[in-house]
Amino acid sequence: MRIDIISIFPGYLAPLELSLLGRARHAGLLDIHTHDLRQWTHDRHHTVDDTPYGGGAGMVMKAEPWAEAIDSIVSDDDAADRLKPLLVIPSPSGTPLTQPIAARLAAEPWLVFACGRYEGIDQRVIDHYSSQLRVEEISIGDFVLSGGEVAAMVIVESVARLLPGFMGNAASLTEESHAPGGLLEYPVYTKPAVWRGREVPPVLLSGDHAKIAQWRHDQALRRTAKRRPDLLHSSESVQLSELDTSLMVTRGQRGDAPELLSLQRSCWVSEAQLNSALDLPPLVESLTDVRNGIEGWTTFVVRAEGRLVGSVRARLDDGVWRIGRLMVAPDFQGRGLGRWLLEHIESQAPLEARAFELFTGSRSTRNLRHYRKAGYRTSVIPPSEPGIVVLRKPRPR
Ligand code: ADE
């Protein structure tokens, strides 16, 4: 990835030589160029700012040095294949930086950062380049720094560590805070087991990996609820009109497996009775199967005051979003949660999905009624197993 950073204080960007970033540069993973904006000024004082039109405090960065700087960098012959960079302008009025934004930027071959100072850059620079390049104004938080340099370094670091080969251990990317799953990271401990009288939580010394995963998940939930309730409440909390309790929806994690196994067994007993089949997979599969299922499918779990009360999963298969394991705890049934879960998993279908598909027992008349009401119709494809009805619905466009 190529990165160009323009600033009136390029010396501020020296830390980009250090640590993992420095190593990635030496390894050729990152090609970072810093530039002094003043080299594109032509007066004796190397002026880069002027008073704002309309009055007011502070100074505004002049358009011309920025345009000359950006033009000269974008037309650099060394830049492979005449690519067009994404122009990133760190600004407290930009879109807040998030992990998905960092991941999106990490897929770009070339980023150019324009680090403003003072009251910002003349708006016409942004408008002009928006018609020629892609331009994004990004904020690193709801506070004001003296300039964009530190913000650019924050963005560069969050992006660079997602590049393949940057981190020694790719698993640490999936386990950390703000990884998909939407929770803050659980607390971590290392040796010694007792430090200044403080013990490491005993479960971490137990060697029981299922218990450890469950404990970590629980800690991550508590921490998120306490410090960042917005993460839970904006995207993950549902209030169903028929339900008085507030439900929390999260992506299923390995640690959910033991509870999910219990829930699915309790939910599929009635299916087994109705369809005279005791060997239904949700009833007979092992904890490992459930764990693998959580990892192999897009799984959501719903909790009410910490208790797992519902779940659903899906995965894309040949353009079809195959939905399964839609379950609701017996005491939560008949209150709209099943319908909500179905709508939720449909809304998560990737763009490539042309249709939704699910199946149920041919004698499960209640399920069949619910699915028909949600727009599903019996599929023309013959079911792979007897006693099963496959239902399909074209994806609404
Ligand atoms: N420049 C000044 N403050 C900033 C912020 N919070 N984010 C990005 N760039 C900035």
Image (tube, grey):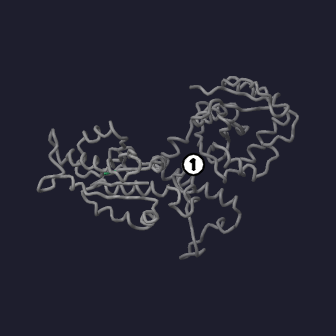
Image quarter of residue 130: top left
Nearer the observer, 158 or 332: 158
Is the residue marked by circle 1 packed among few (<14), some (14-19), or many (20+) residues within 10 Å? some
Which quadrant is home to the C terminus?
Answer: top right
Nearer the observer, 391 or 300: 391
Q: Is residue 210 above or below residue 335?
A: below
Q: Residue at x 81, y 44 (%)?
A: 283
Horizontally, is 61 left or right of 275 in the view? left
Residue 8, horizontal then vertical, whole percent: 24, 57
Nearer the observer, 258 or 84: 84
Confirm whether residue 29 shows in the render. Answer: yes
Horizontally, is 314 left or right of 131 in the view? right
Which quadrant is home to the N terminus?
Answer: bottom left
Q: Residue at x 25, y 45 (%)?
A: 67
| Amino acid type at mark 1 | Gly
Q: Residue at x 80, y 43 (%)?
A: 281
Q: Count the marks.
A: 1
Per the image, the residue denoted by label 1 is: 181
Q: Is residue 395 above or below residue 235?
A: above
* Mark 1 secondary-structure assignment: loop
Residue 36, horizontal then vertical, whole percent: 25, 57
Q: Residue at x 77, y 32 (%)?
A: 360
Residue 40, horizontal then vertical, whole percent: 21, 52
Residue 77, horizontal then vertical, whole percent: 34, 51
